[in-house]
Amino acid sequence: MPYSKGPKPREAASKIAHMEVINNPAIANILQNLKVDSAPKKPNAATPALNVDFSIPTKIEQVLTVDAGLQTVPNPIRREKAMSFINPGVSILSLDDLKKIANDPMMDPRDMGNMLSRCTLRPAYLPLRGVRMTGRTMRDTLREIINASLLPAVTGLYEVLEFLLFEQWLPSGSVKSPRSMNCLFCRDTFDIPEKQIFSCPHCGFEHFLSDYLGLLSSSDPVEQPSETIANSFMRVLELLCLFRLPMLATKNGKHDRLEKILFIKDGSLMLRAEGFRVIDGVRRYLQWLRSRGVTMHLAGVEKTGNMVEFLANFPDAVPCDGDVLIPSRQFLNEEIQGKVYDPTNPRNRVSFGTRVGVRLSASHVVALQVPSNDLTNGGPENPKPNDLPELEEVVRALSKVTSSRYENSLIPLVLANRQVSLAQSSSSRLLEEYVIGLIS
Ligand SMILES: [Zn+2]
């Protein structure tokens, strides 16, 4: 066959289709606006507010990392039936072991496994497609399953949820902030009692405390739930995992142990939408710990998003090791997130972390969220180093656990991610068999 220099017929067709798209005036206009004539310039305000001295030894002795995996398993015979499996877990490593791993990138994974003391909870299962309890709607099936997943036999995380929602760090008899919700049946508002199951005083409809999480908002097409519900539930489980150890320390009067632990959460310190109800409890708890002089070193490590992209574009915003960029909310909104800044509306109910960018090494620039002194509206409009009292210690500890093998990664997160995905791949077949047994 003679060699042809022209485009293959399919390529030619796709080129023509492409041209037609550009001829569309609306699309041509946005493409025009996407074009930039010059390389982006680092905004002048993007200069470090703080430099952390890495030569000072850290007080941190252990690193606790929270992570969760989500896997959707369709029934291999009936693809219209599927379940989601959420695998929440916490790993605890001593900083000394982490340093050994950092210095020996070729370390045998089995040795790493031995160092890792991991507390994996039983996974939570959520029906996704074509699976529901006999005689129940999809919505009620999901409500029952979410409630059951929090019980002691599965994740046992109801204890943490109740702790955060009902301010159980306060002595009994203290005045607590009332919590109310709209009845799922009659829609009237009522105050919820400190219980896991309670009835609406207006119509008697029985609610679970997990209904208060608002994971199934009325607009969701819950008869065909998307993975969004599983994702939101996973975020809630991660957050509850994060506060399990602090809760135990508070309940047992062992706050001195908290100060030597660095808590790392994979992702942001926030829960979207109705999650503000839990965030409100988290904010109160963190403020209470501070008021008692208890230090909790906590960082959310963002791996995606505007802040990560900004730092990738402008690594010289933090030129030296230990440099910390603390953007104001205006700078964050306008320069980093490309949004409009509205100083008259600082309301934020979903976050308990302030964003910072940190250079940990020549090859490690990370986007973190750390809680500030004042958590009203998530944090100050114009945060200064003094507003983030634990930041220096957090950054110093993180500088000891950078991974040379994975670009821009922290070893505790690499290990935690691997544990979650290993658990998934090795048990994936078992899960599938389980699903077949359950729904075929
Ligand atoms: Zn009601």
Image (spheres, rainbow, N blue to C red):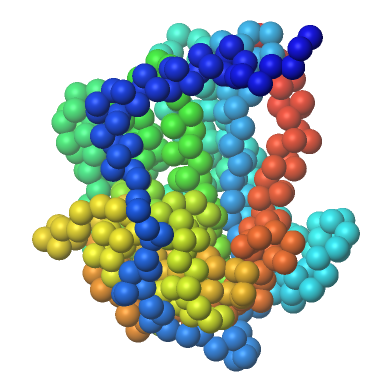
Residue 208: percent from the left, percent from the top? 38, 34
In the image, what residue occupies the spot 68% across and 56% down? 414
Q: Nearer the viewer, residue 185 or 428?
A: 428
Q: How many marks?
A: 0
- Does 5 appear above or below 304? above
Instruction: Say left or right for 32 vs 14.
Output: left
Of residues 56 and 238, the one nearer the viewer is 56
Residue 244 shown left or right of residue 362 in the figure: left
| Residue situated furthest bottom in the rendering | 56
Q: Position of residue 318 (x, y in %)?
A: 47, 75
In front: 289, or 24?
24
State the image coordinates of residue 426 (x, y, percent, origin top left). 78, 36
Q: Quadrant of residue 348?
A: bottom left
Q: Residue at x 37, y 58 (%)?
A: 38
What residue do we see at 43% from left, 22% from top?
18
Inspect this view and state whether residue 336 appears: yes
In the figure, is residue 182 to the left or right of 233?
A: left
Q: Quadrant of the N terminus?
A: top right
Q: Is residue 131 visible?
A: no
- Residue 244: % across, % down: 53, 58
Above or below, 203 against 261 in this view is: above
Quadrant hosting residue 352: bottom left
